[in-house]
Image: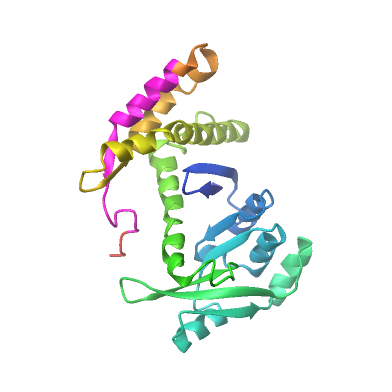
Amino acid sequence: MARASQAYDPLNKITIDTVISPLSVGELDLAASHIKKADVNDLYLFDRGYNAFWLFSMILSKGSNFCARINIRNWKAAHMLIESGLKEKVYIKYPSEKAISKSKELDLSVEPIVVRFISIDLDNSDKEVLATSLLDFEKYPYELFEDLYHNRWQIEESYKIMKSRVEMENFTGKSPEEIKQDFHARTFTQNLAAILAFPVHEEVKENNKDKKYEYQINWTQAIAKMKDSVVLLFIRDNIHKIIEKLQKHFLRNIEPVRPNLDKPEPKR
């Protein structure tokens, strides 16, 4: 068994950093490996599996920011915000003994951090609470955070493409080296498809501007075509012709973006 993790750019559909490891390595430790490569002013979006003081502290030490959905039952500040009825409030977050131990292990500061907590009403009448380091209320008003966090759903779509379209688990060998080669080669292929498709997006948008729905590239078709062509880009001389054919294929194979289909299905 193995665990895969990636730092993903949801706006450009690019994997920034990725790793495959033994299952014994936890999600938080893999996330830390991505953050070690962070740039100043990067913004990390996290779901509830990444609520760790030391992880937030590591992000801040890099000059980056975070916006994470918080488990209300496990975070006192989140529970207090819900009880108060307020939409947002800034709290000082102190590290637990466990967080202090982990922070010292990673040579991180154990000083308290200032966190802005934001309560958002969901369609099912529940509430979600986001914790963020974006403290400027004027520059980052309350109204932008629901859409901001919603971008995180693209990471789930990326994993779906990785599993069902790229067939990541259909390895060509059994040794750790062969599996790592497959994993990173297919991630590279997925990235290359996104890069080559980038100039096509505006043309798709322009060609379909009068239709009921917005349209986007059909990523299933794009990845399938990319898998057949990626090697040719490194062995042929006139690769501009291959790229042109790929982009024409992307342009022909599009699909509508219907409202609410990018949200997780409700539990049955």
Most distant residue in the front direction: 138
Residue lying at 53% horizontally and 33% vertically, measured from the top left: 188
Instruction: List x then y, in percent, for residue 184.
Output: 56, 35
From what the image shows, is residue 92 above or below residue 193?
Answer: below
Residue that extends furthest to the top in the rendered view of this protein: 237
Residue 4 visible to an observer of this rendering: no
Nearer the observer, 255 or 210: 210
- Residue depicted at 61% across the width and 36% down the height: 176
- Confirm whether residue 234 shows in the render: yes
Q: Nearer the viewer, residue 21 or 55?
A: 55
Residue 245: give x, y in percent of width and height. Answer: 37, 20
Quarter in which the C terminus is drawn:
bottom left
Where is 54 relative to 166, above or below?
below
Q: Position of residue 26 (x, y in %)?
A: 60, 57
Asked whether 75 falls inside the magenta stretch, the response is no
Q: Which residue lies furthest to the bottom in this view?
A: 84
Q: What stretch is highlighted in magenta?
A: 241-264
Q: How many marks?
A: 0
Residue 88, placed above or below residue 141: below
Color encoding of the figure: rainbow
Task: Locate residue 115, reporting x and y percent.
Answer: 61, 73
Magenta stretch: residue 251 in it? yes
